[in-house]
Amino acid sequence: MDCDFLIIGGGIAGISAAARLSGLGSVILLEAEEALAHHASGRSAALYEPRYGAPPVVGLSMASGDYFRSVPGVLGPRGLMLVGKAGGEDAFEQDLVAMAFDRISVAEARAIVPILNPELVVEAGYAAHAEDVDTDLLIQGFAREAKGRGARIMTKARVGAIAKDGAGWRVTSAAGEFTARMLVNAAGAWVDQIAALAGVQPLGFTPYRRSMARIPAPGGLDVSRWPMLFGPGEDWYAKPDAGALIVSPAEEHLMEPHDAWADDMVLAEGLARYEEMVTEPVTRLLASWAGLRTFSPDRSLVIGADVREPAFFWLAGQGGYGFQTCPAASQLAADLIGGRAPEIGADLAAALSPARFG
């Protein structure tokens, strides 16, 4: 065998798993693109909001907090502000409770973000617990850890064929052919395709496009200390980014796995929803892009050995939660593969297991 664990996918799921598994045996990671984190991981809004998502996702996110705080510079202050208009009270109240916002007055909200439109914004909430994530620092840290234990990380290594080879697997890629005792499927939007190549029953993952635009700082203001802004029901959001703002329509459009790009019409609609809530118009775009957020049928991550093929391990369905869950998700993968009791607890591990799909 060339390795104990062959990981397919070099996004944050795959690279964090490489770091954890490199302590249990030999690791090879194959990434199809020219660089790590090319797709969804490279297009993240980069926020740690541990109360965001389905209950199992929240459990993983909360369990990741200690790791984030143990690595200097990974987290930074940001905050999250919810702003609502008349007619959206029910959605506002739901988000306020679910994500533990403190209710604040519109005047208090405008003291923090002065471009909020006082004629339209009728209620606001603020959460200080949301923090920026330095995604590059996190990715490079996991990569160094993996390589330091001898892991081989290969880019431009798109997988074309997978076959069972005696007691293990034979994987044919653009970087060559490799044999492994166990496959770890961390291929993002392509996880079901990888499963099919391996003769494993796909679980029904669905990739959804999310578009983003970078716009100049409104009114030339210093936006560096502004929180992320969020519309009730997540129908748009805006976040400071390198002296500018990124704005998203927060859409979920079902797509086939591919290198996604922004839809101009959807982007325009999202920018209009943002624009009506502020006093500064959007005059131009600095850049636009899109990523695919891939969900399991119940919108929680899938972490565990396949029910019918125990040498095939799922690390999939990160959706929009890949970065904020990666420390605990990769630790769970290592615990399960290493035969240890899950650090996050048996109940949460069971809620994330592929066995829940039968």
Image (cartoon, rainbow, N blue to C red):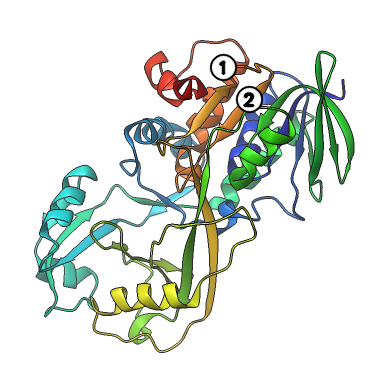
Which of the marked residues, 1 or 2, is nearer the chain's N terminus? 2
Near mark 1 (Cα within 10 A), the count class, few <14, some 14-19 or many ≥20, is some
* Residue 112 vertical position relative to residue 314 in the rendered view, above or below: below
Please identify the quarter of the rendering in which residue 292 is found.
Answer: bottom right
Q: Secondary structure at mark 1?
A: helix
Q: For the residues marked 1 and 2, what is the alpha-carbon distance in whole angstroms?
A: 10 Å
Residue carrying label 1? 336
Q: Amino acid at mark 1?
A: Leu
Q: Position of residue 354 (x, y in %)?
A: 51, 24
Q: Position of residue 320 (x, y in %)?
A: 45, 48
Q: Position of residue 39 (x, y in %)?
A: 62, 55
Q: Amino acid at mark 2?
A: Phe
* Residue 316 vertical position relative to residue 229 in the rendered view, above or below: above
Q: Position of residue 52 (x, y in %)?
A: 33, 44
Q: Is residue 308 toward the left or the right of residue 22 in the image?
A: left
Q: How many marks?
A: 2
Q: Write the residue at 51% across / 46% down.
A: 206
Residue carrying label 2? 313
Q: Write the residue at 29% across / 74% down.
A: 273
Residue 209 in sight: yes
User: Split into 4 quadrants, where in the image is the N terminus?
Assistant: top right
Q: Secondary structure at mark 2?
A: strand
Q: Are marks 1 and 2 in contact (CB under 8 Å)?
A: yes
